[in-house]
Image: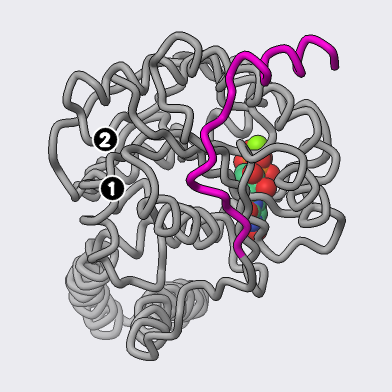
Amino acid sequence: MNSILYIVIPCYNEQEVLPETSARLQDKLARMMQSGLISSLSRVMFVDDGSRDKTWEIISQLHSQNKLFSGLKLAHNKGQQSALLAGLMSAKSYADCVISLDADLQDDIETLDEFVQKFDEGCDIVYGVRSARNTDTFFKKFTAESFYKFMKLLNVDIINNHSDYRLMSKRALDALSEYGEVNLFLRGIVPTIGYKTDIVYYERHERFAGESKYPLKKMIAFAIDGITSFSVKPLNMISGVGIFLSFVSVIGLIYSLISYFAGWTVPGWTTTVCSIWLLGGIQLFCIGVLGCYVGKIYFEVKKRPRYLVDMIVNDNDTEIDADALSDKVKKM
Ligand code: UDP
Ligand code: MG
């Protein structure tokens, strides 16, 4: 249907992958333009999330050589979710639909056509879902599956095995712009929008160069953020634990009174020490969970900007000559 497609790619220190990623996308988009699936005003928008390496230099160079590429430079490193949001909000002014993608092309770009076809059929949101987790380590597979199960347990509407590879229409992006939260967890926010949605299955590849920008520490923080942004059930669970323990302590009290009157009070040291430690630990944990929510409220009430744009390079009204593009690719 010849819609204008923008591909938004958050990039943090991605100098190793950008030359290859841009070449592959150029080839793919040229083919999509030639087949008439997308308009020649479509673009690839790289969002530089405050990188410290040559990422922005590469993006500007790509833009000056080829108008297919545009770039958005954030003033600071704000994390993948904020960078993605910045790109989506900027791209929605020019595009009919936007697909978000990782810079390392772990998400299979050969499925891009399917996303656009579903958009043409009237879908506002199309989720990319991994058909298998073969490229993951056992640890990553196990933790990811536990995370999805836990989210389901908390009644959070989340799509299994979907990361941030998704298409959103301009209408869906307008709806997303109404969400003002600072604690961003797009995978949880997008399903709450509604509209007509569908799924596209794909196989996730290995990162072809550079290192993951999501070490274990960041991954755990992201998972906790996801849980606490969408559910207050952990708070209710604390009350549940409190009620349960009060009940247990009443039994403990009866037991100690009986012990006292029966005259076997001396060997009480173990139980005393154990309960102090156990209750101390549980109390600290519960205060921690409360603190987690209070911390989030603290950030939300401040309403600080979620990202600041330093610079944007986008030539949005130059038509791309797809034949010349694919010739260029052949020569490379
Ligand atoms: N990313 C970002 N800001 C960050 C961390 C990551 O924009 O602070 C981008 C990164 O450049 C990549 C995407 O987020 O395009 C996903 O990161 P990565 O591939 O390192 O994560 P993994 O696939 O290992 O989970
Ligand atoms: Mg990756």
Q: Position of residue 96 (x, y in %)?
A: 31, 39
Point out the residue furthest to the left here. Answer: 195
Judge whether residue 189 can be spotted in this image.
yes
Type of amino acid under label 2: Ile
- Look at 42% across and 16% down and name the residue there: 113
* SS for dot 1: helix
> Residue visible at 19% across and 47% down?
155
Crowd tier of the residue under label 2, counting other residues whose Cα lies within 10 Å: few below 14, some 14–19, many 20 or above: many
Image mark for residue 125: 2
Residue bearing the label numbered 1: 190
* Image vertical order of residue 328 relative to residue 290, above or below: above
Q: Is residue 210 left or right of residue 243?
A: right
Task: Write the start and end of the magenta stretch as one range.
Answer: 312-332
Amino acid type, label 1? Val
Between residue 162 and residue 108, name the one nearer to us: 108
Residue 220, quarter of the rendered image: bottom right
Q: Is residue 119 left or right of residue 44?
A: left
Please identify the quadrant where the N terminus is shown: top left
Q: Secondary structure at mark 2?
A: strand
Of residue 153 and residue 57, the one placed in the foreground of this image is: 57
